[in-house]
Amino acid sequence: MDWTALGLSGRLAITTVLILLPGALLLARWLAHTRFRGKAWIEGLLALPLVLPPTVLGYYLLLGMGNASALGQAFSWLTGTPLAFSFSGLLLASVLVNIPFAVQPMQRAFEGIAQDVLEASACCGMTPLQSLLRVELPLAWPGILGAAVMTFAHTLGEFGVVLMVGGSIPGETRTVAIAIYDRVQAFDTAAAGRMSALLLAICLLTIVVSYVLTAHMGRRRG
């Protein structure tokens, strides 16, 4: 069992959720409450990671973070280390790849809030921020929880983009998905099987817990 790779995957998944969710929440709320020409193009752009092959997405991310890019050069100048094939680059790629997994569940949750509820909060004198904190977030909580769970689980299992952007540097970019691939390539099917089973159990447990919590909150509201 490659515990280093598993720990790296867990750190990457948790950090991705913490960084991505606040911005994704505001973006999801804006998309849910705003109507304008060209909205479908923005939603389509945000959903691209769902349909693009990971190798294609990873290729463009690698171009954007490589030493020949402005971002890569700026990062290297500031830190003295390359952005591509580093944990920082892997984290940036993970945040970008997981945007639809974070935005879409929350957008649907905000869209599900009845308009008369929002109008009632405005009539009560609530500011938009107060309405968000006291009315919308409690009602949209199942979608927020679902976004966090999907982002976490998808990050744990991401392979193609991780391989393209991060490679397989032990302790730096070698996640558990890459470790499984390496074990299969080395014909160590026993180790690959153990890591695959553990990853399957973690992802399944995470999703089941989210369902249980969502159902519990629904019963409390009822």
Image (cartoon, grey):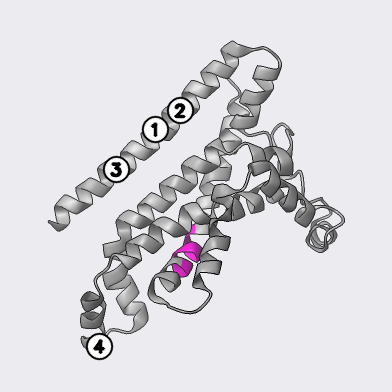
Callout 2 crowding tier (Cα within 10 Å): few <14, some 14–19, many ≥20: some
Q: Marks 3 and 4, how far apart in space?
A: 35 Å
Among the two numbered marks 3 and 2 on one chain, the one whose residue lies closer to the N terminus: 2
Residue type at the position of mark 4: Gly
Q: Marks 4 and 2, how far apart in space?
A: 48 Å
- Judging by the rendered image, the residue that carries numbered circle 3 is 211
For label 4, the SS is loop
**Quadrant containing the N terminus in the rendered view:** top right
- Judging by the rendered image, the residue that carries numbered circle 4 is 125
Report the span colored magenta.
21-27
| Label 3 vs label 4, nearer the camera | 3
Judged left or right of residue 147, residue 119 is left
Q: Marks 1 and 4, how far apart in space?
A: 43 Å
Residue type at the position of mark 1: Leu
Q: Residue at x 58, y 18 (%)?
A: 192
Q: Residue at x 47, y 79 (%)?
A: 36
- Judging by the rendered image, the residue that carries numbered circle 2 is 200
One can see residue 87 in this view:
no
For label 2, the SS is helix
50 drawn magenta? no
Task: Please tell me whether the stretch drawn in magenta is mainly helix, strand or loop.
Answer: helix
In x, y percent, where is residue 162? 66, 40
Vertical arrangement, residue 132 with respect to residue 190, above or below: below
Residue type at the position of mark 2: Leu
Residue type at the position of mark 3: Tyr
In x, y percent, where is residue 110? 34, 66
In the depicted view, which residue is nearer to us: 187 or 42?
A: 42
For label 1, the SS is helix
- Judging by the rendered image, the residue that carries numbered circle 1 is 204
